[in-house]
């Protein structure tokens, strides 16, 4: 599921500040390489014993990721359901209570990034 109109797509930040905001809001930079990084936030549905990941893709527009002053731009915000043994499934409907948590987390991240 792709989140539209989050206000995050196109925002730019240096890597050090983006990592700081991510840590403060519960996101983790899991996947990364020299020019792009993915920040994930895990949401658990205890009723169904399912896990969902709110994910933000970023791309370096200045520098490379190993440098704290590299500038990253947020490209997309989306969510998927975790599948066994690993991976995310993006076509599964997401429960409204999980979407509510995700939308709150998006707003929290955006507010911290713009502060």
Image (tube, grey):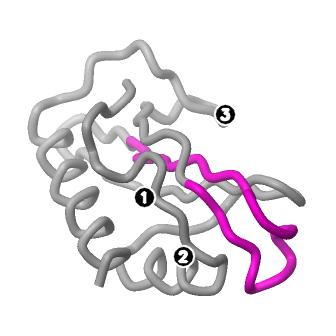
Residue shown at the point (85%, 69%) measured from the top left: 63
The mark that comes first in sequence, 2 or 1, is 2
Mark 3 or 2: the one toward you = 2
Q: Position of residue 112 (x, y in %)?
A: 30, 79
Q: Which numbered disc, 2 or 1, marks the residue closer to the eye? A: 2
Q: Is residue 20 left or right of residue 16?
A: left
- Asked if the residue at tag 3 contacts the one at tag 1, i.e. Cβ–Cβ closer than 8 Å, the answer is no
Which label was assigned to residue 18? 2
Q: Which residue is mark 1?
A: 41
Toward the viewer: 53 or 51?
Answer: 53
- The image shows residue 59 at horizontal and vertical percentages of 70, 52
Q: How many marks?
A: 3
Q: Which quadrant of the structure image shows residue 51?
A: top left
Q: CA distance from mark 2 to mark 1?
A: 14 Å
In the image, residue 50 sits, relative to residue 42, either above or below, namely above
Residue most extreme to the top? 91
Name the residue rendered at 70%, 56% in the picture.
37
Q: Is residue 59 magenta?
A: yes
Image quadrant for the C terminus? Answer: bottom left
What residue range appears in magenta?
Answer: 52-73
- Residue tagged by mark 3? 85
Q: CA distance from mark 3 to mark 2?
A: 29 Å
Query: Residue 76 in magenta?
Result: no
Q: Nearer the viewer, mark 1 or mark 3?
A: 1
Horizontal side of residue 58 vs 32, given as left or right:
left
Circle 2 packing at 10 Å, graded few (<14), some (14-19), many (20+), is many
- Label 1 crowd bin: few (<14), some (14–19), many (20+), radius 10 Å: many
């Amino acid at each position: 599921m792709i989140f539209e109109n989050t206000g995050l797509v196109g925002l730019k930040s240096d890597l050090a500040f983006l990592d700081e905001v991510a840590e403060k809001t519960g996101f983790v930079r899991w996947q990364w390489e020299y020019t792009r990084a993915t920040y994930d936030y895990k949401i658990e549905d205890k009723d169904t014993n399912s896990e969902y990941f709110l994910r933000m893709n970023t791309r370096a527009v200045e520098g490379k990721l190993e440098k704290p002053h590299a500038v990253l731009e947020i490209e997309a915000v989306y969510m998927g359901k975790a599948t066994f043994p690993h991976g995310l499934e993006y076509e599964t409907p997401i429960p409204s209570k999980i979407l509510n948590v995700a939308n709150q987390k998006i707003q929290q991240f955006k507010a911290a990034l713009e502060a």
